[in-house]
Amino acid sequence: YLGLDLSTQQLKAVVVDDALKVVCEATVQFDNDLPEYRTQNGVNRQKDRLTVTAPPVMWVKALDMLLERLKVAGLDLASITSVSGSAQQHASVYWKKGASQLVSNLDHGKFLHEQLECAFSIRDSPVWMDSSTETQCRALEDSLGGAQKLADITGSRAFERFTGNQIAKLFQTKPEAYQATERISLASSFLATIFLGQYAAIDYSDASGMNLLDIASKQWHQKCLSACAPGLEERLGEPVESGCVLGTISSYFVHRYGFPADCAVVAFTGDNPASLVGMTLSEGDIVVSLGTSDTVLMWLNEANPSLEGHIMVNPVNTSAFMGMLCFKNGSLTRERIKDDCADGSWDIFSQILDSTPRGNFGNIGMFYDHKEILPPLIGDFKFNKDGDRVSKFSQEVKVRAVIEGQFLAKRVHAERLGFKRSGKVLVTGGASRNTAIVQVLSDVFGARVYVNEEASANAACLGAAFMAMYGKKRKTDPQITFEEMVQGRRQAMREVAKPSADAEAIYGPMAERYWIIEKGLRSEQGDTCR
């Protein structure tokens, strides 16, 4: 089962067997392996510093190289039963009129990039790092009756990187290019299109990152479509269930690479939904990724959209949802406090953290080196047990305050999206190796914390391979559940922390206090929240 992941900086492939064990992998780095496209970290930044793009033909050429590398690595592509993939969310590709003929009549004697370099109505695809659509975002929210109304429908308020706003900008600034476009793909369905040899549908989960899909009905929302551009529905095609089989692989791959003719192409999805799959989340579980920025992914049974996070259709259970929260101030902020208060030593930082009491004497701190997303604040904010703002903390209090404050924010905002704490916490990222930090995470969430090293490193790509297997197995056994299929994988999880006996008695009230403090700070800035 072949899974691909088209991320910002690379195209990666992982092959798993029936036991879901990785048997082969390969990678193509855009900057190093394809220097002719002159990308930096996989993208091109335009002069305005807001517009960020990548050439889709580079992604095509990377696929040529990746398949060759899999063969060199000894993989017999005739053994591949099904293929699926994930890709950076929100990125969009614009196929020009007549491109469907090119895609369905590929010459297996030539590379893909030689045949598809002229298939696009715009040569550079906007990607998730683009922030040039502020005007289009406000117009979309206004046309739907406000930001919360749009979030109620699509799972998110209008965000600059979301595809609907990118399409609106293209229609307004390059109307001739829009008119010349016969199909708009997300990066995920673009890759699936090449494997399928015809336009591939966008799946529900990735479509949830466009500000265009009604996440309840799982259909395009007509008001959102018409607010962005005319004739948009026919350019997008009908969305489909994540993990469904779209068809069999294009004859190009059969003749050129030896794929079996009956190899199934399973709907590709976005990298965040695929990560939920790769981490084998189930109901009540949450993933906390601790990196330069921190990300939280969670399984939700009900959607409760807010202005702050994102809600998407769940990729392995379409009657459920997944929530996502992003926090800009992650490891760099933790490092600043470590340098200030622990002589730059993580060992000393951990000793201080272990030696201070849970609840930190009632002190709460919020530390934002960059303007945060949740909440939209910048600067350091310190409060004592009475809720009064203070000018400074002792070094010991400050160390615990940065960790507790970050995790309280994650708990509060996850619960506001509808998360119910009933399962486990999976932790990934650099800080997941720090036992003192992980213990605070366990205490704040009142849940056991686990790591899965293999899944952490390859979550999206593994998720794509699992979806390839799940889609194929459901074709022959419609009753099989994702839970049943991945049961064996869950044994790879290792418990690293369990909550202290008094954790909930301390952090339940503290989470309530945190939310009151955050609301107060936001109202001072003129930012209201429900």
Image: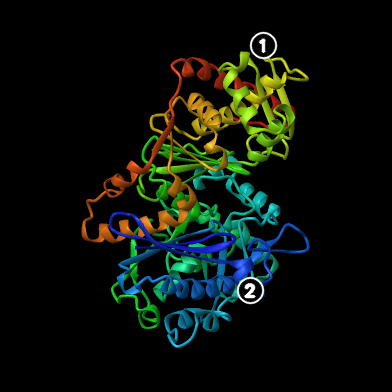
Residue 453: quarter of image: top left
Disc 1: CA contacts within 10 A as few (<14), some (14-19) or many (>=20)? few
- Give the structural element (helix, strand or loop) at label 1: loop
Using the rendered image of the protein, determine whether residue 454 is visible from the camera's viewpoint: yes
Q: Is 290 left or right of 83, judged from the image as shown?
A: right
Q: Residue at x 43, y 26 (%)?
A: 498
**Amino acid type shown at disc 2:** Arg
Label located before the other in sequence (2 or 1) = 2
Q: Is residue 155 above or below residue 335?
A: below
Q: Is residue 184 above or below residue 145?
A: below
Q: Residue at x 23, y 55 (%)?
A: 478
- Give the structural element (helix, strand or loop) at label 2: loop
**Amino acid type shown at disc 1:** Asp
Q: Residue at x 44, y 43 (%)?
A: 322
Q: Which residue is mark 2?
A: 123
Q: CA distance from mark 2 to mark 1?
A: 58 Å
Q: Is 445 left or right of 406, judged from the image as shown?
A: left
Task: Find residue 70 and report its horizontal and vertical position in percent.
Answer: 43, 70
Q: Image quadrant for the N terminus?
A: bottom left
Q: Image quadrant for the C terminus?
A: top right
Residue 62: quarter of image: bottom right
Q: Which residue is mark 1?
A: 386
